[in-house]
Image (cartoon, rainbow, N blue to C red):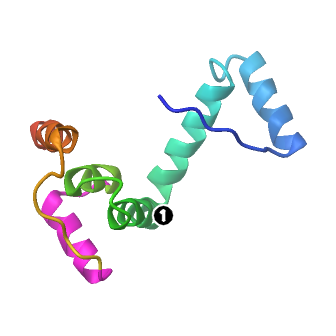
Amino acid sequence: MPRTTATIPNDLTALMEGAVKAGVFENKSDAIRHVLRDYFDEHETARTAAAVSLYADGEITLGTAARLAGVTRFEMRDILREEGVELRFGPEDMDAARDEIDTARNLE
């Protein structure tokens, strides 16, 4: 899992540390993961925009973009077209192919 560094205001840091001490979260990383998950769960537009941006930059595949956005591959394809993002067909390498296969296996 990649590491990310962030600057957090003192009051939010104090609340986070208090929540860890109170047993609300296991540790600071756990707290940050929960907050980010909750944010993206509550803000579907931001979640979709992030997935579109990553796909447009070539950082993720269509399947991964769909999973991150919480939509089907077909819905993601339509979203990308609406946003004017050119679709890429076929995986670029073996890692992308494996990612596509894993994503397809997890479709409901």
Find the residue positioned furthest to the front: 93
Q: Residue at x 81, y 41 (%)?
A: 12
Query: Front-most of 66 and 31?
Result: 66
Residue 89 is situated, as x and y percent measured from the top left of the image, at 11, 63
The range drawn in magenta is 70-84
Describe residue 44's horizontal placement relative to residue 86 as left or right.
Answer: right
Asked whether 49 falls inside the magenta stretch, the response is no
- Vertical placement of 22 versus 90: above or below? above
Residue 26 is situated, as x and y percent measured from the top left of the image, at 62, 17
Q: Residue at x 16, y 58 (%)?
A: 73
Specify the principal SS of the magenta part. Answer: helix
How many numbered callouts? 1
Residue 25 is situated, as x and y percent measured from the top left of the image, at 64, 23
Query: Front-most of 23 and 74?
Result: 74
Q: Residue at x 23, y 79 (%)?
A: 81
Describe residue 96's horizontal placement relative to residue 26 as left or right.
Answer: left
Q: Which residue is mark 1?
A: 46
Amino acid at circle 1: Ala
Describe residue 107's horizontal placement relative to residue 6 as left or right.
Answer: left
Quarter where residue 69 is shown: bottom left
Describe residue 73's horizontal placement relative to residue 43 as left or right.
Answer: left
Q: Residue at x 45, y 51 (%)?
A: 41
- Vertical placement of 27 versus 9: above or below? above
Quarter where residue 10 is shown: top right
